[in-house]
Amino acid sequence: MTGVVTNGSQGAGTGPVPPSAVFSDRAGEEAPCRAGGGALEEPLGRVLRNLDTVTESQGGLGAGLEGARGASSDGAARAADGAVTTIGSGTAIGSGTADGSGMVEGSIAAEPSRREMILDAASALFAERGYDGASLRDISRRVGISHPGMLHHFSSKEVLLGAVIDRLEAHAQGLLDSADSIASSPETLIASLGGPWDPRKHSMALLATLSAEIVDPGHPGRFRIARLRLVHEHVLERVFDGLDERGHLVAGTSPKFLARSLFSLLLSLTVREHTVRELQKTSDADPIADVQEFVRLCCVTD
């Protein structure tokens, strides 16, 4: 999909739709409840459109994307703001999470809105139980509001899922913006793997659970979550390409293969951390050490 999508009819000149709406498989249905702040930046849009073109040519994930329209959720901007931080001598890397936990030290967190509280609860329950295992009533109970109060903000569970995925896309936007900085050295990549891609963090648990669920062809988030995985792989491929250009990759290694393998490892370790690890009384396994060792095996450090 390479054409421009507008908020109105084709050619109406009403402006571009935010990427989080363009890439939704249910965007037409979600539009009424996805108003508010923070469209994602255009670079993520370009990446996702390019990935759509690739998957369409492979007969894969590009179906059902025409006529999408709507606006991104107001939670997206909050997650994007926390997606990049500064470490060391000023190297910027992505470190926020999809639940907006990437706060700057010493800052005062604003009181979350009711909508944000619902998104926080939905993200937590979707990560714990999956989309099918968490009902709107479960989510409203966790927030402490009535079911009608929940429906005032989100008319259906599918609409709520769309807003949760908006946050994950905003998180990916922060990583995309930071890709060149992460690629500055193997040490910077190693450091970032303990931040935004930390298998112990909520954002990775949410992505891992939803990624497992979308093997069901009828899952309402199937296309967006599959595409989101491609974005993470694309970011890591850019990082490995940058390391290769600087002579930091072991000779003969493929950046594309390394990106797919590393992100698969991250998701696998996330599942392990929230299953096997929780059942063990003691464990010497460290998911961060595991992924950092992967990088050390394929990189030449100074």
Image (cartoon, grey):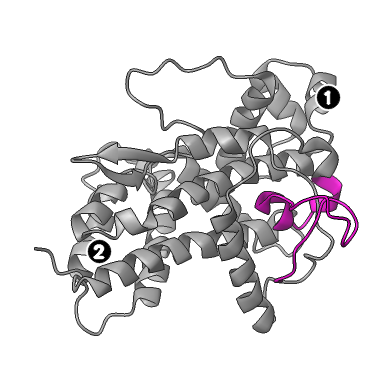
Query: 263 or 1: nearer the eye?
Result: 1
Q: Position of residue 47 (x, y in %)?
A: 56, 64
The single residue placed furthest to the left in the displayed view is 302
- Residue at 49 percent across and 42 percent down: it is 203
The secondary element bearing badge 1 is classed as: helix
The C terminus, quarter of image: bottom left
Prevailing SS of the magenta stretch: loop
Nearer mark to the viewer, of 1 and 2: 1
Query: Is residue 23 inside the magenta stretch?
Result: yes
Q: Position of residue 159 (x, y in %)?
A: 77, 41
The secondary element bearing badge 2 is classed as: helix
Q: Is residue 182 left or right of residue 132?
A: left
Magenta-highlighted residues: 1-30
Q: Is residue 212 among what the camera can see?
A: no
The single residue placed furthest to the front in the displayed view is 13
Q: Position of residue 49 (x, y in %)?
A: 64, 67
Q: Is residue 284 left or right of residue 273?
A: left
Query: Is residue 27 inside the magenta stretch?
Result: yes
Mark carried by residue 152 = 1
> To which quarter of the image does residue 42 belong?
bottom right
Tell me: residue 192, above or below residue 37: below
Read off the residue under disc 2.
Answer: 294
- Residue at 42 percent across and 38 percent down: it is 96
- Residue at 62 percent across and 33 percent down: it is 75
> To which quarter of the image does residue 119 belong?
top right
Q: Is residue 102 left or right of residue 183?
A: right
Q: Position of residue 56 (x, y in %)?
A: 69, 78
The CA span between labels 1 and 2 is: 47 Å
Of pointers 1 and 2, the one earlier in the residue sequence: 1
